Image (cartoon, rainbow, N blue to C red):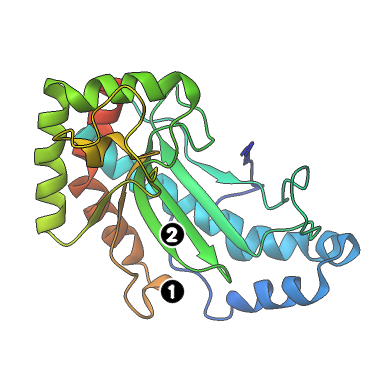
């Protein structure tokens, strides 16, 4: 996937929650799914979703910055609403959700980067978390070396701590078998099978989407899971 961020026109200085009727936009888009409808309603998308999302991400990033020092955070971004149709049988041109992220400076926006926060909202479900969704080819070898070495021991402690606190931490997807070159019963077989490394936040509390407190909730969980992202940067780049 080639994910690119988009700029919004005027982002509000302070996040105050998404509108109570904001989800109606996605229902209408899913029903219409045409360029003509979206062009006519693009200003509505910007004001109801894109601009509040960017304001939210910027607020969380300001609170996260001290946790990551001396690492720097990149400017938060909202991902494109246009679907990549090159390899898809589904020809619908638009996503029915909005997604945005706070990433570490120097990382790509696509899955292989290190997200200090990834947030998705819309008809496709709500999701918030951190990490690297899928290692690219260049990082797979570094991941496997780190997983079986001393960094892997530190990572196991991080994962155990997050899991004790109720987070789902590990691979979003895993290989069915341990990769070639490693014993099937390797003591760190679980790590070796991960295709990426993420930490998923708890489900958003009911109604929080429309509240100013959403920023504080996201910041709290992003701070708690920051050690996983820092481990990724230090050991995989």
Residue 13 appears anywhere in the view? no
Along the horizontal axis of the image, is 5 left or right of 156? right
The picture quadrant where one finds residue 21 is bottom right
Residue occupying the point 37% across, 30% down: 73
Residue 106 versus residue 111: which sits nearer the camera? 111
Along the horizontal axis of the image, is 215 left or right of 84? left
Residue 5 — which label? none
Question: Can you give x and y, in whole percent of width and height, for residue 53 in the image?
Answer: 51, 56
Q: Which residue lies furthest to the right in this view?
A: 36
Along the horizontal axis of the image, is 236 left or right of 210? left
Going from N to C along the chain, the mark reached first, 1 or 2, is 2
Residue 144 versus residue 232: which sits nearer the camera? 144
**From the image, which quarter does the C terminus lie in?**
top left
Question: Height in image: 167 above or below 84?
Answer: below
Q: Which residue lies furthest to the front in this view?
A: 184
Residue 190 versus residue 25: which sits nearer the camera? 190
**Which marked residue is nearer to the observer: mark 1 or mark 2?**
1
Q: Mark 1: which secondary structure? A: helix
Question: Can you give x and y, in whole percent of width and height, for residue 191 in the image?
Answer: 25, 37
Question: Can you give x and y, in whole percent of width and height, for residue 120 in the image?
Answer: 49, 58
Residue occupying the point 52% across, 58% down: 52
**From the image, which quarter does the N terminus lie in?**
top right
Q: Marks 1 and 2, Cα distance to the nearest angstrom? A: 10 Å
Question: Can you give x and y, in whole percent of width and height, for residue 139 in the image?
Answer: 41, 22
Residue 92 versus residue 45: which sits nearer the camera? 92
Q: Mark 1 points at which residue?
A: 210
Q: Mark 2 points at which residue?
A: 15
Label 1–label 2 contact, CB within 8 A: no
Residue occupying the point 85% across, 64% down: 40
The picture quadrant where one finds residue 145 is top left
Residue occupying the point 81% across, 67% down: 33
Residue 150 appears anywhere in the view? yes
């Amino acid at each position: 996937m080639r994910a690119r961020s988009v700029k919004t026109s005027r982002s509000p200085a302070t996040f105050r929650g998404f509108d109570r009727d904001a989800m109606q936009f996605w229902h209408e888009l899913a029903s219409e799914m045409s360029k003509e409808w979206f062009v006519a309603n693009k200003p509505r998308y910007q004001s109801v979703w894109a601009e509040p999302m960017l304001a939210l991400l910027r607020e969380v990033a300001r609170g996260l910055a001290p946790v990551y020092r001396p690492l720097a955070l990149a400017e938060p971004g909202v991902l494109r609403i246009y679907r990549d149709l090159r390899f898809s049988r589904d020809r619908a041109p638009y996503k029915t959700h909005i997604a945005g992220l706070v990433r570490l400076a120097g990382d790509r926006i696509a899955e292989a980067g290190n997200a200090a926060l990834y947030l998705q909202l819309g008809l496709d479900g709500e999701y918030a978390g951190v990490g690297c969704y899928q290692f690219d080819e260049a990082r797979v070898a570094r991941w496997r070396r780190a997983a079986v070495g001393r960094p892997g021991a530190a990572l196991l402690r991080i994962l155990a701590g997050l899991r004790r606190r109720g987070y789902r931490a590990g691979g979003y997807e895993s290989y069915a078998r341990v990769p070639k070159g490693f014993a099937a019963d390797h003591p760190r077989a679980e790590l070796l099978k991960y295709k990426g490394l993420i930490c998923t936040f708890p489900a958003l509390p009911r109604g929080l989407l429309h509240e100013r407190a959403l920023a504080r909730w996201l910041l709290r969980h992003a701070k708690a899971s920051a050690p996983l992202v820092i481990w990724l940067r230090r050991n995989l780049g």
